[in-house]
Image (tube, grey):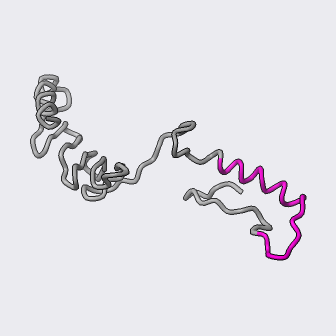
Amino acid sequence: MPRDANGNYTLPVGNPVVPGSIIEAGWANTTMPDIGTALSDSLSRSGQGGMLVPFKNADGSVSAPGMTFTNDTVTGFYRDSTQVAVSWKGVQKMAWKVDGAYIGANKVATINDLSGLEGFAIAMAIALG
Protein backbone atom coordinates (compact mmCIF):
# COMPACT_ATOMS: atom_id res chain seq x y z
CA MET A 1 0.00 0.00 0.00
CA PRO A 2 1.31 3.46 -0.71
CA ARG A 3 1.64 6.15 1.90
CA ASP A 4 -1.32 8.38 2.58
CA ALA A 5 -1.26 12.18 2.10
CA ASN A 6 0.39 12.57 5.52
CA GLY A 7 3.20 10.13 4.68
CA ASN A 8 1.84 7.29 6.83
CA TYR A 9 2.46 3.77 5.53
CA THR A 10 -0.06 1.01 6.16
CA LEU A 11 0.84 -2.66 5.79
CA PRO A 12 -1.01 -4.58 3.06
CA VAL A 13 -4.12 -6.55 4.01
CA GLY A 14 -3.29 -9.73 5.94
CA ASN A 15 -0.62 -8.13 8.10
CA PRO A 16 0.55 -8.31 10.75
CA VAL A 17 0.87 -12.08 11.05
CA VAL A 18 -1.19 -13.60 13.84
CA PRO A 19 0.84 -15.73 16.29
CA GLY A 20 0.50 -19.43 15.56
CA SER A 21 -0.58 -18.92 11.92
CA ILE A 22 1.26 -20.33 8.92
CA ILE A 23 3.12 -17.84 6.74
CA GLU A 24 2.05 -18.51 3.17
CA ALA A 25 4.04 -17.57 0.10
CA GLY A 26 0.92 -16.18 -1.62
CA TRP A 27 0.53 -13.19 0.67
CA ALA A 28 4.05 -12.96 2.13
CA ASN A 29 5.74 -12.68 -1.28
CA THR A 30 3.36 -9.93 -2.40
CA THR A 31 4.00 -8.01 0.83
CA MET A 32 7.76 -7.73 0.31
CA PRO A 33 7.65 -5.65 -2.92
CA ASP A 34 5.13 -3.33 -1.27
CA ILE A 35 7.42 -2.78 1.72
CA GLY A 36 10.43 -2.41 -0.61
CA THR A 37 8.63 0.29 -2.60
CA ALA A 38 7.72 2.17 0.58
CA LEU A 39 11.32 1.98 1.87
CA SER A 40 12.67 3.15 -1.50
CA ASP A 41 10.36 6.16 -1.31
CA SER A 42 11.79 7.15 2.09
CA LEU A 43 14.47 9.81 2.43
CA SER A 44 17.79 8.33 3.54
CA ARG A 45 19.22 9.74 6.78
CA SER A 46 22.75 9.15 5.51
CA GLY A 47 22.34 11.10 2.28
CA GLN A 48 21.83 8.20 -0.12
CA GLY A 49 19.71 9.43 -3.02
CA GLY A 50 17.90 12.72 -2.96
CA MET A 51 14.54 14.41 -3.19
CA LEU A 52 12.66 14.11 -6.47
CA VAL A 53 10.21 16.92 -5.66
CA PRO A 54 10.55 20.15 -3.64
CA PHE A 55 11.44 19.53 0.00
CA LYS A 56 8.67 20.74 2.30
CA ASN A 57 9.54 22.09 5.74
CA ALA A 58 7.31 22.92 8.66
CA ASP A 59 6.84 26.70 8.99
CA GLY A 60 8.08 26.77 12.57
CA SER A 61 8.51 29.87 14.70
CA VAL A 62 11.31 31.99 16.15
CA SER A 63 11.58 29.68 19.19
CA ALA A 64 11.01 26.44 17.25
CA PRO A 65 12.26 26.88 13.68
CA GLY A 66 10.92 24.59 10.95
CA MET A 67 14.45 23.69 9.84
CA THR A 68 16.98 23.25 12.65
CA PHE A 69 20.17 21.43 13.54
CA THR A 70 20.58 18.13 15.39
CA ASN A 71 22.56 19.71 18.24
CA ASP A 72 20.78 23.08 18.29
CA THR A 73 17.02 22.87 17.80
CA VAL A 74 16.39 26.57 18.56
CA THR A 75 18.61 27.80 15.72
CA GLY A 76 17.43 27.61 12.12
CA PHE A 77 15.01 28.88 9.50
CA TYR A 78 11.31 29.58 9.88
CA ARG A 79 8.54 31.43 8.06
CA ASP A 80 5.38 33.22 9.03
CA SER A 81 2.86 35.28 7.09
CA THR A 82 5.26 38.21 6.60
CA GLN A 83 8.77 36.79 6.32
CA VAL A 84 11.30 34.00 6.03
CA ALA A 85 13.76 34.38 8.87
CA VAL A 86 16.77 33.00 10.70
CA SER A 87 16.56 32.33 14.41
CA TRP A 88 19.71 32.05 16.54
CA LYS A 89 19.16 30.45 19.95
CA GLY A 90 15.47 31.41 19.74
CA VAL A 91 16.06 35.03 18.74
CA GLN A 92 15.38 36.36 15.24
CA LYS A 93 18.63 37.60 13.69
CA MET A 94 17.83 38.03 9.99
CA ALA A 95 14.70 38.15 7.85
CA TRP A 96 13.66 38.45 4.25
CA LYS A 97 10.39 40.32 3.78
CA VAL A 98 8.49 41.51 0.74
CA ASP A 99 10.25 44.90 0.87
CA GLY A 100 13.81 43.74 1.52
CA ALA A 101 16.33 42.03 3.77
CA TYR A 102 16.74 42.81 7.47
CA ILE A 103 19.37 42.10 10.09
CA GLY A 104 17.70 42.58 13.42
CA ALA A 105 15.27 45.48 12.94
CA ASN A 106 17.52 47.20 10.38
CA LYS A 107 16.71 47.00 6.70
CA VAL A 108 19.99 46.36 4.88
CA ALA A 109 18.75 45.82 1.34
CA THR A 110 15.58 46.77 -0.49
CA ILE A 111 13.99 45.30 -3.55
CA ASN A 112 15.27 47.03 -6.74
CA ASP A 113 17.94 48.95 -4.79
CA LEU A 114 21.35 47.47 -5.51
CA SER A 115 23.06 50.13 -3.40
CA GLY A 116 21.52 48.43 -0.37
CA LEU A 117 23.54 45.29 -1.09
CA GLU A 118 26.72 46.99 0.09
CA GLY A 119 25.08 47.60 3.46
CA PHE A 120 23.82 44.04 3.43
CA ALA A 121 27.34 42.68 2.84
CA ILE A 122 28.77 44.82 5.65
CA ALA A 123 26.00 43.82 8.04
CA MET A 124 26.50 40.13 7.19
CA ALA A 125 30.24 40.45 7.85
CA ILE A 126 29.52 42.03 11.24
CA ALA A 127 26.83 39.47 12.09
CA LEU A 128 29.10 36.53 11.21
CA GLY A 129 32.02 37.96 13.14
Q: Is residue 56 left or right of residue 64?
A: right
Quadrant of residue 94 within the rendered picture = top left
Position of 22 relative to 41 (above/below): below
Residue 52 visible somewhere in the drawing: no
Image quarter hosting the N terminus: bottom right
Q: Is residue 114 above or below residue 17?
A: above
Instruction: Please provide the residue range marked out in magenta.
Output: 17-39
Q: Is residue 76 magenta?
A: no
Q: Is residue 14 left or right of residue 55?
A: right
Point out residue 50 in the picture as x, y percentages from the top left corner: 54, 37
Of 55 and 40, the residue lying toward us: 40
Q: Main secondary structure of the magenta part?
A: helix
What residue appears at the point 89 percent right and 58 percent down from the top-left corner?
Answer: 25
At x 52%, y 39%, the residue is 47
Residue 31 counted in the magenta span? yes
Position of the C terminus by quadrant? top left
Whole-percent x, y for residue 24 in the image = 89, 63
Q: Residue at the location (42% across, 49% down)?
A: 57
Would residue 78 be found to the left or right of residue 120 on screen? Answer: right
The reply to whether residue 85 is visible in this rendering is yes
Q: Quadrant of residue 28?
A: bottom right
Residue at horizontal 90 percent and vertical 59 percent from the top = 26
* Residue 38 versus residue 129 in the image, above or below: below
Residue 101's x, y, as percent?
A: 19, 37
Q: How many marks?
A: 0
Expressed as whole percent of the image width and height from the top left, the position of residue 111 reads 20, 31
